[in-house]
Image: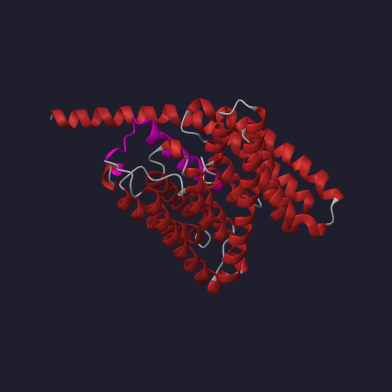
Amino acid sequence: MTFYQELQLSQAGSKEYIASFKDPKEKRKHIYIYLFKIILNVAFCTAFITAFSIIFGKSNSLAGLAVLLSIMAFRFSDFGIQTSHAVFCVFAVFGILAAGPKLTNIVPVGWAFLINLICIFLLMLLGSHNVMMFNHSTLVLSYLLLQGYDVSGKDYKMRLAGLLAGAVITAIILFKNHRKITYKRSLKNIFQEFNFSSTRTRWQILLALGVSSVMLIASAIGVPKAYWMGIAAMSVTMPFRNDIAERAKFRGIGNITGSFLFILVYLFLPESCLPYLGIIGGIGTGLSVHYGWQTTFNSFSALSIAVPVLGIKYAILFRIFNNIFSSLFMLLFERIFYPTLSVISNQFNKLMLRKSSD
């Protein structure tokens, strides 16, 4: 494998490749290449978001992050359907990202819940047919970030332009990287395979309903950084039920640890260094294998943005509260959701059986 090819590997691919070497010297060499790739990625991400902010406005830097996440995700992953249909899905997804978050910020909380439910479910349905791709972590995260950092007037028009440009770039990259892969499934099959008995469908509904519910609670009680609660709920809601409890545990531990470490660093660094803590968080996340450590370093990135707005005391307080509350909420919600959905599904099947026999 050439140096360039090694740089093109995904994070999981790089770690697997390093693990394949038995010779310590060779292993060390490829660890250095991996570290170089992490630094290169952070530099690229910083440059991309800076350029996006210059072109589309500083208030749209989070929209730049949403575009960046999609570009990086769909270099490697896809929608699990024919590539031409997947390109359509890219534009549909960006249409949802453009409209949904904005609508939720201008309607009453009840309507916002309904919009969230519909939009997040559509993102799950279109983008997470292949659950192993983990596309939901990109799509739902982007949706919630755009909702949390709403803009209006000219800034919103620039956001629409930026998201349109992002959709075009993402579609081109997806088509270029996946056009030679043959899939039998079409967009129509995604809707045909929707089934209440399917583990995938149940997970998609669970995540959409759970995240929308926790966002409704956050809005009702007026919690700052409500989107943190939605992101936490999304992050712990895995396709397989046995994984949810473990993710919830490490979500809490990671945020407490990350907040504590952030305070220590914050107290000893001048305030001008605060933006660099977000970069440290990005590098740490890239190096982390375990979800707990990823959550720890993600806290650095989140807090570096929140502290100038909320102050160190309230930023730490709501970072910990929002994440622990959402993790516990999804644990409880999941245990109620699956038995309830089974009852509804069984009743529906009985009703359809009676109708077919009449």
Question: Residue 39: percent from the left, percent from the top?
Answer: 65, 49
Q: Residue at x 62, y 67 (%)?
A: 58
| Image quadrant in which you'd find residue 229 | top right
Q: Which residues are magenta?
A: 190-215
> Residue drawn at (63%, 30%), measured in percent from left and top?
249
200 drawn magenta: yes
Viewer-closest of 17 and 220 = 17
- Image check: 167 left or right of 344? right
Q: Is residue 235 above or below residue 276?
A: above
x, y percent for residue 304: 72, 53
Position of residue 262 relative to residue 332, above or below, is below
Tell me, yes or no, if residue 120 can be seen here: yes
Q: Is residue 45 placed above or below 236 in the rendered structure?
A: below
Residue 230 picture quarter: top right
Give the left or right position of residue 4, taking residue 30 as reference: left
- Residue 13 percent across, percent down from the top left: 52, 37
Q: Give 309 or 61, whichever is nearer the viewer.
A: 61
Quadrant in which the C terminus appears:
top left
- Left/right placement of residue 68 relative to residue 221 reads left
Q: Is residue 250 magenta?
A: no
- Rendering coords of residue 248 (x, y %): 60, 32
Q: Is residue 77 above or below residue 132?
A: below
What residue is drawn where x is 63% and y is 58%? 46
Looking at the rendered structure, the number of numbered marks drawn on it comes to 0
The kind of secondary structure the magenta stretch mainly shows is helix
- Display coloring: secondary structure
